[in-house]
Amino acid sequence: MDVLDRLRLDVPVAQAGMGGGLAGPELAVAVADAGGLGTLGLTAPDRLRDGIRRVRAEAPGRAVAVNLLMPFVRRPHVRVCVEERIDVAVVAFGGDRALVRELRDAGVFVFTMVGTADQVRRALHWGVDALIAQGAEAGGHLVGESPAAAFLPKARDLAGGRPVFLAGGVATAADTRAALDAGADAVVAGTRFLLTHESGAHPEYQRRLLEAETTYRTMLFGLGWPAPHRVVGNAATRRWCDASGTAKRLPVWINARSEFMARLGDVPPAVLVRWQRPALPLFSPAAPTRAMPAAWVDRTALYAGESVLRMAAVIPARDAVAELSPAQGV
């Protein structure tokens, strides 16, 4: 399979479908126009439908992709994807064979994000079309347990000829070339596209990322979704994490008992963050978006991969695609 041709891509670069308002239609359109795979993050079903239609209208001839963040996916989200006949779905942090079959029967090309050999085998049992192999250096929530370069050959060996995209540690064209040379079919970048003009990230969030000197793997921002994630520090991490990023017992204990909250419906991130305070051990997965006050960056998750330490500016999404293209500088 020529997966780039199948997904109508000019370059082997995909933008991660960051949820919570970070990856909306403005970003997806810009990436698609530049020849990459623009991906919509999960949002309320009616807004998701509007976003799909906007990408299709403003980036004609390009694939429409949606990230299905399974802890928060409900039937209406799937129904919208099927009814709007999206081209690509990324099933992440959950899923099952029935969902994959339903999407594929509707003509959707289905990726699953994986980070271990067992996750690869499970995804293949579901019948997915392709894999996103995530390395532990990636930003946001993590399934990866090994560095991307170490996990990629294992994922390729198990994939049975299915395409494998690599996520984690991707910041430059050299990173893309190295991934392709190691057997990846394309790369997926999150942090590089978070630091673009078209992302939904608050400018103060972006500024904090560019000033960061390290990233932390933690469990702090797990209310409703108790999974590990990579962030840069803020007042919340200083209060509730040690120097390595390990969260203290109280927030971990609370988060471990909070999964039911993900099923409460489409609560706008701003509603959750409004009640958060650095002094209280209650932190949702919400990240600071443009519509939030700048001060909220100290009470929210500042997601970023290790690649952020090699980035110096917020740039247009088109330039980000060009910077990641393996032909850059050749």
Image (spheres, rainbow, N blue to C red):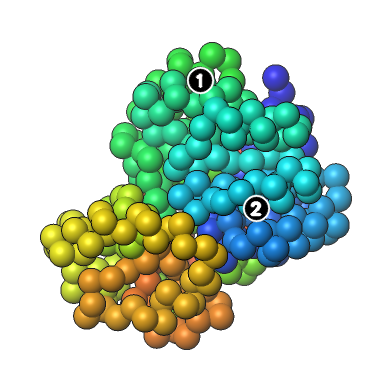
User: In the rendered image, which residue does mark 1 sit on?
Assistant: 125
The answer to which quarter of the image holds residue 210 is bottom left
N-term-proximal mark, 2 vs 1: 2
* Residue at 71% in and 35% down: 108
Q: Picture coordinates of residue 134 (x, y %)?
A: 43, 38
Q: Picture coordinates of residue 53 (x, y %)?
A: 80, 57
Q: Is residue 20 above or below residue 179?
A: below
Q: Picture coordinates of residue 246 (x, y %)?
A: 18, 56
The answer to which quarter of the image holds residue 153 is top left
* Residue at 57% in and 47% down: 68
Task: Say what secondary structure mark 1 lies in.
Answer: helix
- In this rendered view, identify the residue nearer to me: 206 or 176: 206
Q: Is residue 156 above or below residue 173?
A: above
Q: Quadrant of the C terminus?
A: top right
Q: Picture coordinates of residue 202 (x, y %)?
A: 51, 75
Query: Badge 1: how crowded within 10 Å, few (<14), some, or many (20+)?
Result: few
Q: Is residue 201 above or below residue 329?
A: below
- The answer, for residue 174, to whether it is visible in the render is no
- In this rendered view, identify the residue nearer to me: 57 or 212: 57
- The answer, for residue 45, to whether it is visible in the render is yes
2 vs 1, front mark = 2
Q: Quadrant of the N terminus?
A: top right
What kind of residue is marked 2?
A: Pro
- In this rendered view, identify the residue nearer to me: 171 or 107: 107
User: In the rendered image, which residue does mark 2 sit on?
Assistant: 76
The answer to which quarter of the image holds residue 120 is top left
Q: Is residue 257 left or right of residue 285?
A: left
* Residue at 79% in and 60% down: 54
What kind of residue is marked 1?
A: His
In the drawing, what numbered circle is on residue 302?
A: none
